[in-house]
Image (spheres, coloured by chain):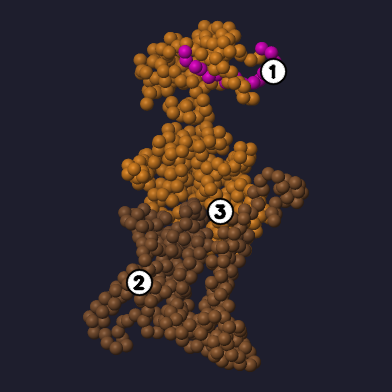
Chain colours: A brown, B orange
């Protein structure tokens, strides 16, 4: 019920007349529906990561810890020392997964760092300076956001293969020294699609930024670089961090562009999972997804907590 | 100090491009000399070029033409962090992510001062602005008046040659503003630092300044002590902008060495015995002005410089009563001080009452046409 304090002291007040806090049944049910559509698939996915059935079509109960058991489709499930967490143990043993996870993190961290720096610089430049091509540069920021990812992926692939062809040809590179698709190309393409997001988020933060803060710092004897380091950056940091977080999550779960730009040795988790799906979907895939979801979820929770703590200090 | 002038502007022009693409002289051939240790104000309405002039002294803007000198040195394109001037901003611009102590210490850290010296000087300046004990607060936890003092402290701790203040009291309420005016003035006298103060509030400028530059449309209209500007306005703009004035269009009828007789067609009357400045010619069209508090209301008609009219309105405002008198269709403002209680019967002028106005010739100003 409502937490309106008037409710507690004057009980008749809520009975007649309108109570603005009263829940309308329609609002309640639509809210519930949103939650069901959002979270039911995730809950099912997590549940299936404990599935005893290797085929993973129906849920056949948890993997037993001590004695083998026969599941409904007739196959035998061997007991595992990990018990219900059998598929997580299998996952931990899988070297390919470890490599893909490593690649994913490397790509995400490097592309986030680089795109945060470039994006912040772009936002500052767009806010501060007037130049002829400014409307064009502002518009060009939206292009990578609105353009279909597959178009961008093919575009980047074409660019790199043409470019590498020319370079390899003209320098006469052969064998291992040849330039080819790999971690580098994935990182560059991730930076390319992350920069606009960072720029737009930082720009929003800069909207209310009074230039007199920077003038005050310079007035007190700080040169341009010190002013940026000691005043501008700390003040826009929440914006830069949100932009970086956005870039990080975009990079973590990007499939389409990575699909076109990766090469041998640069398989990321989304690409790896896609590969698995084409063979057999074992609960190991679900276990992987569960770990993934929990990681992202806890990162978001920690950041949220940090932000509210920061907000309370001010 | 080696130089007589703390700040000198020599024929400074600042051009801006308006959004429509037109060129605009925000500051238009301004020259002024600000003496060491004086409280100097630039007074004008918004867009008159006062803030731009201040920003050029601070180094946030560079003159398009002309030169700014600080302590005799041409500044050219010297960046703000290499000028020995400090600014108190209209918005205060206190660093929100730093504490009061860190805000004030910022400028000293930039000088590379030692830690114990920083602590000593911050403590001292906080005593000066009467905010001891606030070191650990964040700016947001302070009241407007306190933030204003911190902004002053942060600039003063650097012991600048010149302190620039850009409408620093604009955000405060009237009572606090009046207190701060006196406090700033006392601080300036105590420290002997040159203050350059930008304001649109004439009373504020009058209260605090040794000298005032009245600005309009990017030009200095008059530069002088408050009393000069009020009593001897250089032109109609200044007479109108500073305080209140009654204006009449007139013509010089006769001119002697010391005195002039002016004919005012609107009143079909002459004002005689006006003390004149130089440069007037017989027959010249001029504007005559007189301050409302210098017009006297007389019971009996006198011989010279008296005009009869009818009271059209009276407004009681506490210290004064404003009486509006119709002189042959021309409305004249008269301010009478309430030396006696207006509650006494008969102490008010009634609407429609016949009165005689006296304009003493020494109070009448002759202003040249622009």
| Circle 1 residues within 10 Å: few <14, some 14–19, many ≥20 | few
Image quadrant where one finds the C terminus of chain B:
top left
Task: Name the chain letter of the residue that bears numbered label 3.
Answer: B
Disc ID at residue B343: 1
Q: Position of residue B260 (x, y in %)?
A: 43, 15
Q: CA distance from mark 1 to mark 2?
A: 88 Å
- Distance of label 1 from label 3 (alpha carbons): 50 Å
Mark 1 belongs to chain: B
The magenta stretch spans which residues? B329-346
Q: Where residue B1 sits in the image (x, y, percent)?
A: 50, 48
Question: Can residue A99 be spotted in the picture?
Answer: no
Give A166 or B333, whichever is nearer the viewer: A166
Q: Is residue A39 above or below residue B171?
A: below
Position of residue B236 relative to residue A137, above or below, is: above
Disc 1 or 3, which lies upstream in sequence? 3
Q: Is residue A82 magenta?
A: no
Is residue B150 visible in the rendered structure shown here? yes
């Amino acid at each position: 019920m409502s937490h309106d304090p008037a409710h507690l002291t004057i009980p008749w007040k809520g009975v007649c007349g309108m109570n603005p806090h009263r829940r309308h049944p329609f609002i309640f049910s639509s809210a519930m529906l949103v939650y069901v559509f959002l979270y039911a698939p995730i809950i099912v996915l997590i549940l299936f990561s404990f599935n005893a059935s290797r085929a993973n079509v129906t849920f056949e109960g948890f993997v037993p810890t001590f004695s083998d058991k026969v599941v409904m489709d007739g196959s035998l499930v061997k007991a595992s020392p990990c018990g219900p967490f059998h598929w997580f143990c299998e996952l931990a043993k899988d070297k390919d997964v470890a490599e893909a996870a490593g690649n994913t993190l490397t790509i995400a961290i490097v592309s986030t760092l680089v795109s945060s720096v470039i994006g912040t610089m772009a936002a500052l430049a767009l806010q501060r300076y007037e130049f002829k091509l400014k409307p064009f540069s502002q518009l060009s920021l939206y292009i990578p956001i609105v353009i279909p990812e597959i178009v961008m992926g093919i575009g980047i692939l074409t660019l790199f293969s043409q470019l590498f062809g020319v370079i390899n040809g003209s320098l006469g590179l052969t064998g291992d020294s040849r330039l080819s698709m790999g971690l580098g190309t994935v990182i560059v393409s991730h930076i390319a699609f992350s920069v606009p997001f960072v720029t737009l988020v930082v720009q929003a933060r800069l909207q209310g930024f009074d230039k007199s803060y920077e003038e005050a710092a310079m007035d007190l004897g700080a040169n341009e670089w010190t002013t940026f380091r000691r005043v501008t950056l700390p003040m826009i940091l929440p914006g830069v961090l949100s932009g970086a977080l956005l870039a990080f999550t975009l990079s973590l779960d990007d499939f389409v562009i990575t699909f076109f730009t990766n090469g041998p040795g640069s398989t990321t988790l989304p690409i790896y999972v896609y590969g698995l799906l084409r063979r057999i979907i074992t609960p190991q895939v679900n276990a992987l997804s569960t770990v993934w979801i929990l990681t992202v979820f806890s990162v978001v929770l920690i950041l949220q907590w940090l932000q509210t703590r920061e907000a309370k200090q001010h | 100090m080696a130089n007589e002038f703390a700040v000198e502007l020599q024929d400074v022009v600042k051009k801006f491009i308006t959004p429509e693409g037109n060129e605009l002289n925000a500051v238009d051939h301004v020259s002024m000399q600000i003496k060491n240790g004086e409280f100097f104000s630039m007074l004008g309405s918004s867009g008159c070029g006062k803030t731009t002039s201040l920003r050029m002294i601070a180094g946030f803007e560079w003159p398009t033409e002309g030169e700014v000198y600080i302590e005799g040195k041409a500044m050219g394109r010297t960046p703000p962090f290499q000028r020995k001037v400090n600014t108190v901003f209209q918005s205060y611009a206190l660093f929100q992510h730093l504490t009061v102590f860190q805000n004030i210490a910022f400028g000293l850290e930039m000088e590379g001062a030692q830690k114990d010296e920083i602590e000593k000087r911050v403590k001292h300046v906080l005593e000066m602005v009467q905010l001891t004990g606030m070191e650990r607060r964040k700016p947001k936890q302070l009241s407007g008046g306190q933030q204003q003092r911190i902004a002053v402290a942060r600039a003063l701790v650097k012991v600048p040659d010149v302190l620039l203040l850009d409408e620093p009291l604009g955000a405060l309420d009237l009572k606090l503003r009046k207190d701060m005016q006196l406090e700033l003035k006392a601080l300036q006298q105590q420290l002997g630092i040159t203050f350059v103060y930008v304001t649109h509030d004439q009373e504020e400028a009058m209260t605090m300044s040794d000298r005032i530059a009245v600005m309009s449309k990017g030009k200095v209209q008059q530069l002088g002590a408050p009393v000069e500007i009020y009593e001897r306005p250089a032109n109609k703009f200044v007479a109108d902008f500073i305080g209140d004035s009654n204006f009449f269009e007139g013509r010089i009828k006769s001119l002697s060495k010391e005195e002039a007789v002016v004919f005012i067609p609107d009143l079909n009357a002459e004002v005689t015995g006006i003390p004149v400045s130089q440069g007037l010619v017989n027959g010249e069209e001029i504007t005559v002005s007189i301050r409302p508090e210098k017009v006297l209301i007389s019971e009996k008609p006198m011989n010279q410089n008296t005009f009869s009219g009818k009271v059209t309105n009276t407004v009681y405002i506490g210290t004064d009563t404003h009486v509006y008198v119709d002189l042959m269709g021309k409305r004249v403002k008269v301010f009478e001080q309430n030396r006696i209680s207006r509650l006494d019967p008969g102490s008010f002028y009634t609407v429609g009452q016949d009165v005689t106005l006296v304009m003493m010739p020494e109070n009448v100003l002759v202003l040249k046409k622009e």
